[in-house]
């Protein structure tokens, strides 16, 4: 049965994935990570989905990291740690590799795994209540290469080192300053701002957006060799598409383009 602590909806071009564990500030268990990976795989196979918004329920937190109350059951043995890490890593990788643009809608606490989820998304918008922290150093947790790579790719190695070694809490204004989020808005405006952003992204040419997302990912990881052949093929496909003609006609006719992703 689906885990009701992960809510997914795909109505129209903008899909949503909600962490629905508000009584624990959307802390994530092993079962929730498994559900996230499965649901992202399903959404990726729906061509009508052109953008994905990731958020947390309840208004007090985006995601507050791992559910520490479950550690004795899930992470008290080496085997349990390995299983949990495999499940969470698969969920992060599925979100990072999601083929359409992803937007993190952040309110309240964004802690540990919440930060890692946020930096797996392409765009991050928070309200002014948001607070960010990676507390691994205060909990004695191992924090691996991939989450550090993702964070450093967004905020730079210097800022990532500061956040990780001090495990300090930062507010929305500092998160904006270091590039952890793209926008900070008033809490009352967050839903409308993210809805408008998602609709704007979803209205753009899908093939162009996919190519740009792939290229941005490659540029953000200069240590990894870019597959230039694949990236060049994605760009070439844009010029060969029906959407390229539609975009030109719409521009000349001064109307919104109606892209079909072909």
Image (tube, helix red, strand yellow):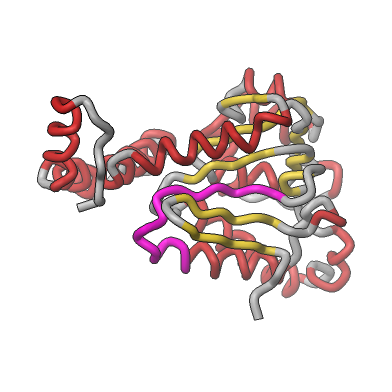
- How many numbered discs? 0
| Boundaries of the magenta span | 42-56
Residue at 42% across, 61% down = 44
Instruction: Please give left or right for residue 183 compared with residue 135 in the image.
Output: left
Question: Quadrant of the image for the N terminus?
Answer: bottom right
Is 156 included in the stretch rendered in magenta?
Answer: no
Residue at 60% across, 34% down = 192
Instruction: Please give left or right for residue 27 compared with residue 196 in the image.
Output: right
Q: Nearer the viewer, residue 112 or 159?
A: 112
Residue 63: percent from left, percent from top: 73, 48
Residue at 14% across, 47% down = 241
Residue 37: percent from left, percent from top: 56, 65
Is 53 included in the stretch rendered in magenta?
Answer: yes
Residue 152: percent from left, percent from top: 57, 34
Figure check: 146 above or below 169: below
Residue at 37% across, 58% down = 48
Residue 138: percent from left, percent from top: 85, 42
């Amino acid at each position: 049965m689906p885990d009701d602590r992960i809510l997914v909806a795909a109505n129209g071009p903008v899909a949503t994935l909600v962490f629905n564990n508000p009584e624990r500030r959307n802390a994530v268990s092993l079962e929730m990570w498994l559900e996230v990976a499965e649901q992202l795989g399903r959404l990726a196979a729906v061509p009508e989905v052109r953008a994905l918004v990731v958020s947390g329920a309840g208004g007090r937190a985006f995601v507050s990291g791992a559910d520490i109350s479950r550690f004795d059951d899930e992470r008290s043995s080496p085997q349990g740690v390995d299983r949990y890490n495999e499940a969470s890593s698969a969920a992060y990788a599925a979100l990072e590799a999601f083929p359409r643009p992803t937007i993190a809608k952040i309110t309240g606490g964004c802690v540990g795994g919440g930060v890692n989820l946020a930096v797996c998304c392409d765009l991050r918008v928070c309200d002014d209540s948001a607070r960010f922290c990676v507390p691994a150093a205060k909990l004695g947790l191992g924090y691996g290469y991939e989450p550090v790579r993702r964070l450093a790719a967004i905020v730079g190695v210097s800022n990532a080192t500061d956040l990780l070694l001090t495990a300090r809490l930062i507010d929305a204004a500092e998160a904006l300053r270091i590039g952890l989020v793209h926008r900070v808005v008033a809490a009352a405006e967050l839903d409308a701002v993210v809805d408008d952003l998602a609709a704007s992204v979803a209205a753009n040419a899908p093939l162009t957006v996919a190519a740009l997302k792939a290229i941005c990912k490659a540029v953000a990881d200069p240590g990894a060799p870019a597959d230039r052949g694949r990236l060049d093929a994605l760009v070439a496909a844009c010029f060969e598409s029906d959407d390229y003609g539609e975009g030109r006609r719409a521009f000349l006719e001064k109307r919104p383009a109606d892209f079909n992703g072909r």
